[in-house]
C-alpha cells in the first residue's frame, strides 16, 4: 500500500513539474531563450484575430513598454523592454533593461505568440546621479553569466518572465474581445447653386 501511495505521489510531482516547466523561458533550437505560447480560439477567423492583435499592439501598452514595429498578413511584430531594479544601500535604482522582440501570428481558430531576442542593456550612474543605459555593453541573455552573478541573472529572468507573462495575459484578453467595426465616414457633397 505504501508503495502505491509513494508511486502516485511521485507521478503527481512529475506531472506538476512538467506543467510548470512548459510555462517558462526555455531554449529554442538556436540556443536562444524564448517564451512561446499557442492559444486556441474556436470559431474565430484569421482576419478577426489579426484585427484584435493589431488593436492590442497599438493600444494595450504605452510605447515605452511595447512598441509596434510592423505587420504582415497574419504576423505582427513589436519590441519592448523591462527595467530591472536593484537595491543599493539607500534605495532602489535601475540596474538594467532587458529588450525583447514579440511576434504574434494568427490563423483560423488559433494564434501563437513568442518573445525572443532578449538583450541585457546595463545601466550606470552618470555625472548627474541619474541611472542611464551604458552604450556598447549590451549582452544577450544567453550570455548573461559572463557579466552577471548567478543570483543577479536569476533575478533578471524572474522579472522578465513575470513581464512577458503579464503581456501574454493581456494579449489573451484582447484576443477574446471583438473589435468594433470601423465606421466609414460619409462625405457630404455640395452642389453649387450656379450649376443646374
Image (tube, rainbow, N blue to C red):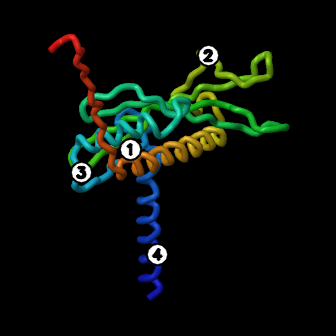
Mark 1 secondary-structure assignment:
strand
Query: Residue at 51% of width from left, 47% of height from top?
Result: 166
- The residue that disc 3 covers is 44
Q: Which mark is residue 36?
A: 1
Q: Is residue 47 left or right of residue 117?
A: left
Comes first in the chain, label 4 or label 3: 4
What residue appears at the point 79 percent right and 18 percent down from the top-left corner? 128
Q: How many marks?
A: 4
Name the N-terminal-most of marks 1 and 2: 1
Q: Which circle marks residue 135 in the picture?
A: 2
Which quadrant is home to the N terminus? Answer: bottom left
How far is the residue under mark 1 from the one under mark 3? Answer: 21 Å
Residue 76: image quadrant is top left
| Dot in front, 2 or 4 | 2
Mark 4 or mark 1, which has the lower sequence index? 4
Q: Position of residue 123 (x, y in %)?
A: 67, 25
Residue 118 appears in the rendering: no
Q: If you read the primary sequence from the N terminus, does the residue marked by circle 1 or circle 3 appear first?
A: 1
Name the residue at 48% across, 47% down: 165
Amino acid at each position: 500500500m505504501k508503495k502505491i501511495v509513494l508511486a502516485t505521489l511521485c507521478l503527481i510531482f512529475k506531472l506538476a513539474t512538467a506543467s510548470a516547466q512548459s510555462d517558462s523561458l526555455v531554449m529554442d533550437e538556436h540556443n536562444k531563450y524564448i517564451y512561446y505560447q499557442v492559444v486556441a480560439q474556436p470559431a474565430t477567423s484569421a482576419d478577426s484575430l489579426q484585427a484584435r492583435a493589431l488593436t492590442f499592439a497599438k493600444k494595450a501598452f504605452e510605447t515605452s513598454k511595447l512598441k509596434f514595429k510592423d505587420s504582415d498578413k497574419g504576423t505582427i511584430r513589436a519590441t519592448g523592454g523591462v527595467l530591472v531594479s536593484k537595491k543599493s544601500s539607500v534605495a532602489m535604482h535601475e540596474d538594467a533593461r532587458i529588450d525583447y522582440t514579440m511576434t504574434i501570428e494568427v490563423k483560423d481558430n488559433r494564434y501563437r505568440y513568442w518573445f525572443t531576442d532578449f538583450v541585457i542593456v546595463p545601466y550606470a550612474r552618470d555625472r548627474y546621479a541619474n541611472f542611464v543605459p551604458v552604450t556598447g555593453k549590451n549582452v544577450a541573455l544567453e550570455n548573461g553569466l559572463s557579466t552577471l552573478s548567478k543570483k543577479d541573472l536569476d533575478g533578471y529572468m524572474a522579472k522578465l518572465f513575470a513581464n512577458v507573462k503579464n503581456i501574454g495575459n493581456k494579449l489573451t484578453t484582447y484576443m477574446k474581445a471583438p473589435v468594433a467595426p470601423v465606421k466609414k465616414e460619409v462625405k457630404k457633397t455640395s452642389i453649387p447653386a450656379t450649376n443646374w
